[in-house]
Amino acid sequence: MYSNKENVNILTALLVQHGVRHAVVCPGSRNAPIVHNLNECPDITCYPVTDERSAGFYALGLAQALNEPVIVCVTSGSALLNVIPAVAEAKYQRQSLVIISADRPQQWIDQLDGQTLPQPGVFGGLVGKCVSLPEIEDCCQADEMRWYCNRLINEALLALPACIHINVPITEPLFQFTTPELPRERKIERIVPGTDYGCLPPDIIDSLAKAQRPIIVFGQSSPYDFSGEGLHTLFSHVIVLHESLSPFPSISHFDKVLANWQMELPDFVIYVGGTIVSKRLKQFLRRAKDAEVWRINTTGEVEDTFQHLRGIIVGDARLILQSLSEKLSNKPMTASIEYRCQWLQRLKAASRHAAQYEPDYSQMATIREFERRLPSSCTVHYANSSAIRLANIYASHHVWCNRGVNGIEGSLSTAAGFSLCQSPDSPVTFCVIGDLSFFYDQNALWNQNLRANFRILLLNNGKGGIFNMLPGLEKSPARDALISAQHTTSAQGICQQNGVDYRRASNTAEMKAGIEWLTGEKCQAPMLLEVFTNANDDEKTLKDYYKLL
């Protein structure tokens, strides 16, 4: 029987799956559940050593002889500090130690309770990875805590052969050994296929070839990073979903599809690129618990956005996908034609609806008109919140956006900085931005370097309009004045003091004339069009768009 502590059981199961087979264990009460599990597990051999400093070096000797990672398990408090000399030696010998420390619950650290000190991070740069596991309680977030615990342990074990530190907080009672068997845990793999990308594991290729409902998702990428060249075989069998931030000069309107239809979940997912704006897509793929999910990135980092990651393929996404496409051309593909046709038909219907939908005067109508009148050669930056979501309905070109952490600060400055790399006569850099983002970053215009190739479309509805779209928030009397920062500010004075040509629009006719001026006029200074709309009208037009088809 194993411990009743779920984080300890998940840890034990994953140690076995990652091939860790030997443990030096030290005495203690707080680490007793861990030591019990290691001893109970038939795949792990335990060696007792009382002195923790000696135990660390015993583990180092075992690692040298076995040429594989060895566990050092200690109790809470100063016991952990005694392992530091052995970890330092192991680091510079390139030997692998897995330091597992029991810990007191977080709320008791620094509260003058016995054997408590801040344990995560005590090894500093001597370890390649340090994680502190959550305790899993019976509550509405228990499943998320299990996923988080699994992910942290996988992240740490994937850092081997560097030394790693896994800290395990354990709440009393400590000595309940009532679990009959270890859980079946997901092991995340890291695949490094080599410089020629010709040696991708056959099981990945076979799984993709056999998948009935495969999907490739492209997140944010630079347009310089990717092209669809050499991917015909792959793209002709899978559904490809991407937004305006992807490297492709179009959008696939999947957000509209997911808002209107119950789509069958995929069974194989490849995720390329950076962040995704669509919350609907993330929720959709997180429900695909049986899907085989592979992440392609250049760092090998565990980025488990959809919570079912099978593994990471490390390298250039373009070359990896080209290799996959080439290998699939020699295999029979079993992807469901019905599933593919259903997606393609609905994506086409959603695209047609976006083109035909005529919003009333609003931010949505403004972006629709702006995108229609954009010159063929230009660069467009969108700010976060409502602006980038509207771009994902209407943009037919690559969009730049500070989507790394999705903050509203700095969008104007980033676009302005981008414009400085262009010659004065080169294509224009546009920035589409909401009012809060603009006023937060207005000092971007307080800059003597700006030229006439920088132009701004400012969407001003007098508040953070995105907050109107959050269900339940309308019940709070604080929503408008406090949470969404309602205001009556205009950009006119800011433009005047910084030498920016300014126009304003408050109705459809003024908006269309202003966009014609912004996108077509020759000017000797930066330009800004401020479009004033009503936040309630903006909310209604967007909600109607997602309801109607």
Image (cartoon, grey):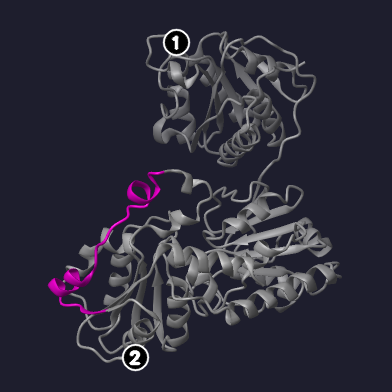
Q: Earlier in the sequence, mark 1 or mark 2?
A: 1
Quadrant location, the C terminus: bottom right
Quarter holding residue 463: bottom left
Residue 523 visible at all? yes
Instruction: State the residue at coordinates (38%, 57%).
Output: 464
Q: Is residue 399 above or below residue 168?
A: below
Q: Residue at x 36, y 81 (%)?
A: 511
Residue nearest the observer in this picture, 260 or 173: 260
Residue 536 at x, y percent in the picture = 44, 62
* Quadrant of res 498: bottom left
Closer to the eye: label 1 or 2 = 2
Q: Amino acid at mark 1?
A: Gln
Residue 16 spot, x, y in % from top left: 71, 31
Can residue 331 be spotted in the picture? no
> Where residue 272 appears, x then y in whole percent?
59, 62
In the image, which residues are magenta? 477-503
Q: Pick whichever, 465 or 393, lies toward us.
A: 465
Label 1 element class:
loop
Residue drawn at x 38%, y 85% is: 509
Residue 325's place in the image compared with 284, above or below, is: below
The type of residue carrying mark 2 is Gly
Number of numbered markers = 2
Which residue bears the numbered disc 2?
520
Q: Tag on residue 115? A: 1
Mark 1 burial class by Cα count in 10 Å: few <14, some 14-19, many 20+: some
Q: Is residue 488 magenta?
A: yes
Spatial CA distance of label 1 from label 2 is 70 Å
Q: Viewed as shown, does residue 197 lie left or right of 301?
A: right
